[in-house]
Image (spheres, rainbow, N blue to C red):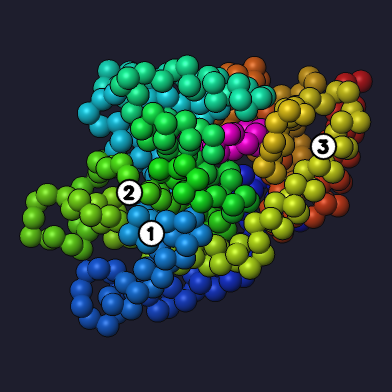
Amino acid sequence: MIINFDNAATTYPKPPSVKNAVIQAVEQFGGNSGRGGHALAMRTSRALYSARTVAAEFFGAQPENVVFTLNCTHALNLAIQGIMKGGGHLIMSSMEHNSAARPGAQLALDKKITLSVARICDDDSCTVQNFRELIRSDTKAIVCTIASNVTGQLMPWRELGRLCREHNICFIADGAQACGVIDIDISEGINILCTAGHKGLYGITGTGLLITDGKYKISPIIQGGTGSASKSLRQPDILPDGLESGTPCIIGAMSVKAGIEFIRRKGTDKIFAHEDRICRSFVRELEKNKNITIYRNPHSSYVPIVSFNADGIPSEELAEELAGHGYCLRAGYHCAALAHTQLGTDTGTVRFAPSVFSTENDGITLANLINNIANRKKL
């Protein structure tokens, strides 16, 4: 039996409605959206637009400002490279995933931009002040994850949105670990929201979203067929066409639509409450063991993710032993070099991440197993 607590990487299992949407897309939406006036193409185009509309309504955007991507990494690259084209100063947080940190760092290494890193604190006001102190006259954008993929710490994203508005700076938010778990509306200060379709939105892998309020022009980093302005060699300026070169993944888009509809039926507040309860029970059990370090502090808020280590046991070794008992948890650095540098976790951490389908009992049973392993190894 497999019990998945690696849902921060990809949620599994998926809702039955997502599976059904994928099957329907394969069976009925076999045309190429926007490429042709025949019945099959038109039917597929309508299906894709319906998915775009559902995503727009969920995040408070306009349908034309919803861009389907391959994943959150793709969306963040489009946003960061597209906004920073032409140079300028970029600020990112010290807890960024490599999908944001690497494109920013590479642009800086290539001397196309300048880059600053704002340290995340336990206290939100301290975090906002750290960002504020780094703003310069040429600061063009701030990039910050809404919730850390390592610890689950929630960032003061609304306050950062207000800070960006004060200084006319583009705010790019990584919602990969927050979307579907907490309510996020881009009208609350986000200019560009990037997220995964296959995590908290319960779509299939190979799906992501870039959602913009349209205030800042995003220069495309990929050019090609868009189904519009085909006679011109210039990439269209209009959205979503300008950022959606090539045939879109209709199957993936329909899975994300079904995932969002599933979340709306459940309610993000109920999903969060369920997953948070599992995390709190899990943490309470681990806190009984002095050989376990939990990377949470009482001054911060968290999405349902818990990172921990057992004294004297490398994170990957502990995860491997847990896998032998049927539990799926991710260990190591979680593609987040900046975060682990700040945490000082030289061998990474083990990450626990439930989903709406997880049970509290499974979390408690796992915690007891971890405690037993930690005590045995310590002898």
Which residue has dot 2 on it? 214
Q: Which mark is residue 62?
A: 1
Q: Is residue 379 visible?
A: yes
Q: Nearer the viewer, mark 1 or mark 3?
A: 1
> Does residue 192 sit above or below 260 in this rendering?
above
Taking depth in this image into account, of 204 and 137 the one nearest to the observer is: 137
Taking depth in this image into account, of 61 and 255 the one nearest to the observer is: 61
Range covered by the magenta-colored residues:
143-157
Asked whether the beta carbons under mark 2 and mark 3 sit within 8 Å of each other, the answer is: no
Secondary structure beneath label 1: loop
Measured as percent of width and height from the top left, residue 114 is found at: 33, 18
Q: Which mark is residue 283?
A: 3
Q: In the shown orientation, is residue 325 left or right of residue 88?
A: right
Residue at 77% across, 29% down: 298
Calculate the distance from the C-alpha at mark 1 to the C-alpha at mark 3: 40 Å
Q: Amino acid at mark 2?
A: Gly
Question: Which image quarter is the C terminus in?
Answer: top right
Specify the quadrant of the image occupied by residue 135: top left
Q: Amino acid at mark 1?
A: Gln
